């Protein structure tokens, strides 16, 4: 069935891209097509530089340098470093996933990866500064504190609930030997 889908993949994508033109009036369909093109260009402007930087990180930084700081035995230091890396991020969330994969291959623990992705998605420092300046100090600080608590608790819960065979499957899939 997978081979059959591959044959129809491009026509299905073309249909999905042109469907707004058929369903809506030409102005809305044209606007949707224009926005789709803008988004594709924006993503194509972000992804290649990130992959170049990740390639350099992958080659230049050894596993022995990353594992003690973000690995299973990193403890509180790894949690804080993961929080800092995620919260000081700039860019959309889809950039965090290739970075997380490289971090796993370099020896980071799954708990610290969960914290990194959670911090990237909810705890960005520029977002906190924007909230503080526009919504007030109390709101910004309380939202940041709730996000910090939630990210850490969810990462610990995911790490705890992950079965040993699932953990091993994930680690062997991404770790370099």
Image (spheres, helix red, strand yellow):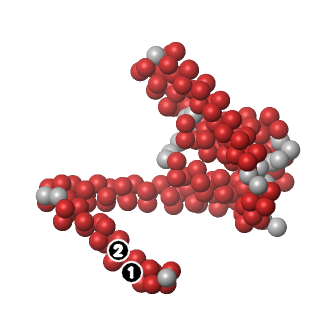
Marker disc for residue 155: none
In this image, 71 relative to 37: left or right? right
User: Which residue position is annotated with label 1?
Assistant: 8
Indicate the secondary structure of the residue bearing disc 1: helix
Residue 25 seen in this snapshot = yes
Looking at the picture, how far across and down is residue 70, in whole percent? Answer: 78, 45
Separation (CA) of disc 1 from disc 2: 6 Å
Residue 61 seen in this snapshot = no
- Say whether marks 1 and 2 touch (CB < 8 Å): yes
The quarter holding residue 78 reads top right
Looking at the picture, how far across and down is residue 89, in whole percent? Answer: 57, 41
Task: Work out whether 146 lies above or below 81.
Answer: above
Taking the spot 63% from the left edge, 33% from the top edge, the residue there is 150
The quarter holding residue 123 reads top right
Taking the spot 40% from the left edge, 54% from the top edge, the residue there is 42
Taking the spot 34% from the left edge, 74% from the top edge, the residue there is 12
Indicate the secondary structure of the residue bearing disc 2: helix
Mark 2 surroundings within 10 Å by alpha-carbon count, few (fewer than 14), some (14 through 19), many (20 or more): few
User: Which residue position is annotated with label 2?
Assistant: 12
């Amino acid at each position: 069935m997978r081979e059959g889908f591959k044959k129809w993949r491009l026509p299905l994508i073309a249909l999905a891209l042109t469907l707004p033109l058929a369903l809506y009036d030409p102005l809305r369909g044209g606007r949707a097509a224009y926005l789709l093109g803008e988004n594709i260009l924006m993503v194509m402007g972000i992804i290649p530089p990130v992959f170049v930087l990740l390639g350099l990180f992958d080659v230049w930084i050894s596993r022995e340098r990353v594992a003690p700081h973000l690995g299973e035995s990193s403890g509180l230091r790894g949690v804080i470093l993961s929080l800092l890396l995620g919260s000081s991020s700039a860019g959309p969330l889809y950039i965090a996933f290739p970075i997380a994969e490289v971090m796993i291959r370099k020896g980071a623990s799954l708990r610290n990866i969960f914290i990194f992705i959670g911090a990237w998605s909810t705890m960005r420092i520029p977002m906190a500064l924007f909230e503080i300046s526009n919504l007030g100090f109390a709101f910004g600080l309380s939202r940041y504190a709730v996000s910090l608590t939630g990210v850490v608790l969810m990462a610990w819960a995911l790490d705890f609930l992950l079965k040993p065979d699932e953990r091993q499957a994930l680690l062997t899939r991404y770790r370099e030997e």
